Amino acid sequence: MNPNTGELRRIAEGQAMPDGFEALYDKRLAQLARSKLDRDEPAQVNLRSTSPLAQWAKKKRKAKLAAASRRRNRK
């Protein structure tokens, strides 16, 4: 899943992860993503909703911003 855009893609085993995408290792999130992908491929997650996938993406975006802030503040 791309946490910035909400795009879901099915990646084959051994295939390289596209830029900006992260794997869903949590079983519950992976199951939700699979069910959404079974309906339509490629799928889109509404990032403004309160679904577990949207909350996961929000945490990833916040962590990225926090890491950038820590890097800037080290100087």
Image (spheres, rainbow, N blue to C red):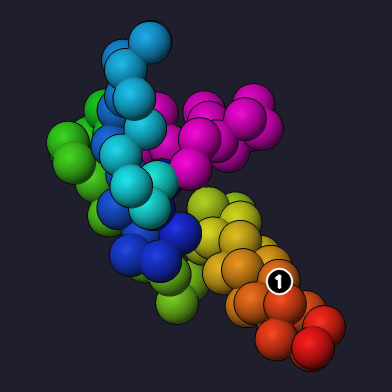
Determine the main secondary structure of the stretch shown in magenta. Answer: helix
Tally the marks.
Answer: 1
Q: Image quadrant for the C terminus?
A: bottom right
Q: Secondary structure at mark 1?
A: helix
Residue 26 vs 11, above or below: the answer is: below
Q: Which residue lies at the image location 22% right of the left edge and 35% below the top edge?
A: 39
Residue 56 horizontal/vertical position (percent): 61, 56
71 on left or right of 16: right
Residue 23 horizontal/vertical position (percent): 50, 35
Look at label 1 and name its amino acid: Ala
Q: Image quadrant for the N terminus?
A: top left
Work out which residue is located at the far front of the displayed protein and give it. Answer: 75
Q: Which residues are magenta?
A: 22-36
Residue 19 horizontal/vertical position (percent): 33, 47
Q: Nearer the viewer, residue 35 or 43?
A: 43
Q: Is residue 18 magenta?
A: no
Residue highlighted by disc 1: 67
Work out which residue is located at the far left of the displayed protein and give it. Answer: 41
Work out which residue is located at the far top of the displayed protein and give it. Answer: 13
Q: Nearer the viewer, residue 75 or 38?
A: 75
Residue 71 vs 27, above or below: the answer is: below
Q: Quadrant of residue 61?
A: bottom right
> Mark 1, residues whose alpha carbon is within 10 Å: few (<14), some, or many (≥20)?
few
3 on left or right of 56: left
Q: Nearer the viewer, residue 66 or 53?
A: 66
